[in-house]
Image (tube, grey):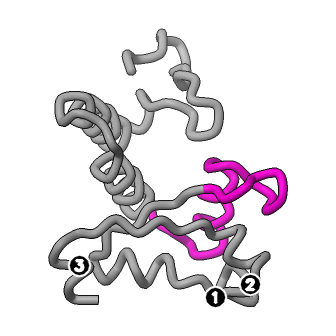
Amino acid sequence: MRELTSRQVPLTVCPLSNVKLGVFPRLEAHNLRHMLERGLCVTVNSDDPAYFGGYLAENLIAAQQALHLTAGQLYQLTRNAIQAAFLPEPEKQVLLDRATDAYQQPSASVDCVSGAPRARRGRRAGRL
């Protein structure tokens, strides 16, 4: 664990398939939250969505609800995924900036399921 934490080796976790395959008896028993609290570079992913019952958004929503993940932990999962992506650093930085803006100003963020800008009441939606 120390090596994984110190080197920030990205770990892909597919919560819904982990339960369906019997790795955990139920989602509430998943160790995702513990991994985040230990400082591991964990990311949430989907694994054969048609078979295991969910794409990325469904995995994130189910994990958040079952494990009571905070907004900060969801933000960390997002940052981890961006940092682990095979993208040029400038593109990663653009995505990290967007994630930070959405986290710091939730009223100007995007809907986590559809990706559409959230409209503000009485004002136009903010820039992504």
Report whether 45 appears left or right of 1.
right
Residue identified by numbered label 1: 29
Side (left or right) of 88 relative to 10: left
- Name which of mark 3 and mark 1 comes first in the sequence: 3
Q: Identify the residue at horizontal 52%, vertical 84% (top origin).
A: 31
Q: Amino acid at mark 2?
A: Arg
In terms of secondary structure, where does tag 1 sit? helix
Inspect the magenta stretch and tell me whether residue 120 lies in it.
no
Image position, residue 27 (x, y; %): 69, 78
Q: Indicate the quadrant where residue 46 lies.
A: bottom right
Q: How many marks?
A: 3
The residue tagged 2 is: 26
Residue stretch in magenta: 46-70
- Residue type at mark 1? Ala
Residue corresponding to mark 3: 5
Cβ–Cβ below 8 Å for labels 1 and 2? yes
Q: Is residue 112 above or below residue 44?
A: above
Q: Main secondary structure of the magenta part?
A: helix
